[in-house]
Amino acid sequence: MAKTAKISSPYAARIAARGHFRTLRLDTPFQPRIDALMKRNDWYDWGGYRAANSLWDEELEYFAIRSQAALFDISPMVKYGIEGPDAEAFLNRVTLRNVSKLKPGRVHYTAWCDDEGHVLDDGTLFRLSDERFRLCCQERHLPWLLDSAIGYDVSVAEQTEAIAGLALQGPTSFAILRAAGFAGIERLKVFDLADFEHQNGTVTISRTGFTGDLGYELFVSAELALSLWDRLMEAGRLHGIRAIGYTALNRARLEAGLIVANADFSTAEHALRADRVRMPDEIGLGFMVDLEKGHFNGRRAIEIARKNKKLRHILVGLEIEGNIPADHAIVYHRGKKEVGLVSAAGWSPLAKRNIAIASLARPFGDTVTDDLWVEIYALRELKYEKLMKRAKVVPRPFIKLDRRTANPPADF
């Protein structure tokens, strides 16, 4: 008699009950609420988690960010707890910015490199206290962080599953947090963070986000996730709160000129070809490099590349004629010489412009910015047509909203 395989995973058991197997995806602590709101069955894989591309209407989800308040599940974002007497020295050693300038109760955007000065990832560093930090990023780096921590009195632990996260973004986000009873939320300035009471625990709220709008990120232990969701949704009922997926968030981040690892640049650990890796100056992160502090990963290589003018690429914002998005379009100089590639593109409803982020080979996009073109293939009546459209290098962000930095924010 044939033996029946034992299913030890609850996810495998759930799928087997349907009569077939599929690739398993983890659920976030907010999954029951998101599943209840999902109208489109439009999912994608975010670091092994089942995440929503769009829940109901990607266009209206985008406008929820810009005119109301949008709630987005950021629990799959990789999170590391780093603490100990040497936590500051350790983070100063592995990241580009000067961590000693980051005060408790503050957040900064940073990046880290390998020894050759190539970017491994970018992310946000939260200083929770003198000796406690939380590092949030796109990719997983635990072995590298543990190896780098040898010789430091510091502990490094992954907290991705233990800590649930939400992004609350949009003009009414402050009003919702106030209505939810988070007393003192008006004191948070951009990149501030503070702990607030929630049930029998705490929620850490930072004035950060990935939309270029007024917004906050909330972190809570996984067991308190659903009650936090319910608290926000009830408080936001009269303030236009809506749950959204990544497609809408991605459009907002493009308008804000923000980059995504392994989308707008290849991280050093994922690049298969030597010419695909990037140094901080090549992806617009050169401002992070603090040469006034002590040694850090990649410092010598970055200094040499700057001194010898060996930086080969530049990441630029483009404004493109017409209104057809130039997704993954090739960029040409004078319509003939291939000089780069568009990594993110779309029509901006707020800026009323056709915008893009592109990686170009220097000197194009740097000292040579005239006569640039993009090659777009547009589907028209079941046939692709090649369109050559003019492109102009423009500053990022493509939009700048005063409400993002207003103190205190407007209360609706």
Image (tube, rainbow, N blue to C red):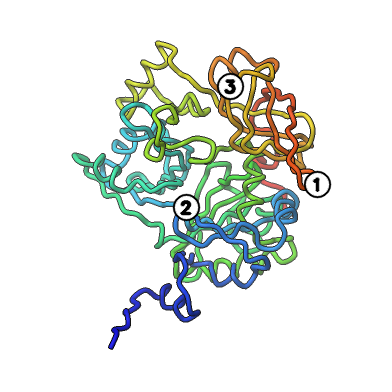
| Residue at position x 40%, y 40% in the image | 270
Measure the C-alpha gap from mark 3 to mark 2: 33 Å
The image quadrant where one finds the N terminus is: bottom left
Viewer-proximal residue among 340 and 353: 340
Q: CA distance from mark 1 to mark 3?
A: 30 Å
Depth check, mark 3 against mark 2: the one in front is: 3
Mark 2 or mark 1: which comes first in sequence?
2
Q: Is residue 58 above or below residue 333?
A: below
Can you identify the residue that label 2 sits on? 77
Q: Amino acid at mark 3?
A: Val
Secondary element at tag 1: loop
Left or right position of 209 against 222: right
Mark 2 vs mark 1, foreground winner is 1
Residue farthest to the top, as pictured: 308
Q: Circle 3 — which element?
A: strand
Residue 205 screen position, x and y as percent: 52, 54
Q: Against 311, is 180 above or below?
A: below
What crowding class fits label 1: few (fewer than 14 Cα within 10 Å), some (14-19), or many (20 or more)?
Answer: few
Q: Amino acid at mark 2?
A: Met
**Mark closer to the chain start, 1 or 3:** 3
- Locate the C terminus and report the quarter of the image it occupies: bottom right
Position of 35 with respect to 319 (left or right) is left
Q: Quadrant of residue 303?
A: top left
Mark pair 2, 1: CA separation:
40 Å
Residue 250 left/right relative to 4: right
Q: Identity of the amino acid at label 1?
A: Glu
The residue identified by callout 1 is 381
